[in-house]
Amino acid sequence: MLVHGVQHAGTLRRPGVRAALARQVRLSGLQALPAVAVIAMLLGAIVPTQALALLGTDNEAVLKNLVWGGIRELAPLVTALVIVVRSGVAIAAEIALMHLRDGMDEALWLDAAHEDEVVIPRVLGLALSAALLVSYFQTLAIAAALVASALLLGTPLLAELDYFLGNGVWWQVLASVGKGALFGLGIGVVSCFHGLHAARQVAAIPKAAVAAGVGSLAVVFTIDLFAAWLRFL
């Protein structure tokens, strides 16, 4: 399904497909910003607190590297979980429900052009939304972590910011955003797959939603494990 979507990406030139893409970004990305903001700020404040409780202040450099590294790794993972809960299962249920709409012609449903209009905006929309949310998550979580570290360690906030800017690696931030986009892409593909293959029965809708949720989580953790394996090569 992913290869098919890439091969037919030209359908984005259609106004209806672009409108569907914008709708998906709004639903999965913009409307998820408040939930992601709350989680990011809580996580950014909790991680330094717990790290201090476990490590103390004896090795401040190790502590701060743990905090920044943890936030970079958790940002795409937590964002992916939010997308699965809010959008993945909803997409599968929405597409499965299309089978039950009165007047839908089975031949039209199986037509490649119709499938492109259903799949491509949702898959690409989730990928864009995930990249947006990871960037947003990292910004808020790091800001909260800087404030928490400054308060707990008794250091100036500008000193914490200077340490972060001096020791941060720009490509790690981009890699985290790229991983988030891959997560969104995988969630979109799995959700569309289960929605498209749902039976034309009311009972098939919740089954498709559950399968999409479980399958999306499996894809997210598989990509995350593969990315971790690549770092050790």
Image: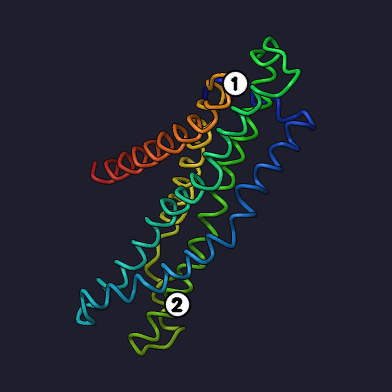
Q: Quadrant of the C terminus?
A: top left
What number is the disc on residue 182?
none
Q: Is residue 63 left or right of residue 19?
A: left
Q: Residues within 10 Å of mark 2 (few under 14, many from 20)?
A: some
Q: Residue sitting at 66 percent across and 23 percent down?
A: 100
Q: Which residue is mark 2?
A: 161
Q: Which residue is mark 1?
A: 7
Q: Is residue 199 left or right of residue 171?
A: right
C-alpha span from label 1 to label 2: 44 Å
- Out of 136 and 37, give the one closest to the viewer: 37
- Out of 232 and 76, give the one closest to the viewer: 76
The x and y percentages for residue 77 are 41, 51
Q: Could you say whether the residue bearing mark 2 is in a helix, strand or loop?
A: helix
The x and y percentages for residue 57 are 23, 82
Residue that protrudes farthest toward the right in the picture:
15
Whether 44 is drawn above or below 211: the answer is below
Mark 1 belongs to which amino acid? Answer: Gln
Q: Is residue 19 left or right of residue 201?
A: right
Q: Could you say whether the residue bearing mark 1 is in a helix, strand or loop?
A: helix
Q: Residue sitting at 75 percent across and 38 percent down?
A: 19
Whether 177 is drawn above or below 139: the answer is above
- Out of 8 and 86, give the one closest to the viewer: 86
Residue 146 placement: quadrant: bottom left
Residue 201 placement: quadrant: top right
Q: Going from the N terminus, do you reach mark 1 or mark 2 first?
A: 1
Mark 2 belongs to which amino acid? Answer: Leu
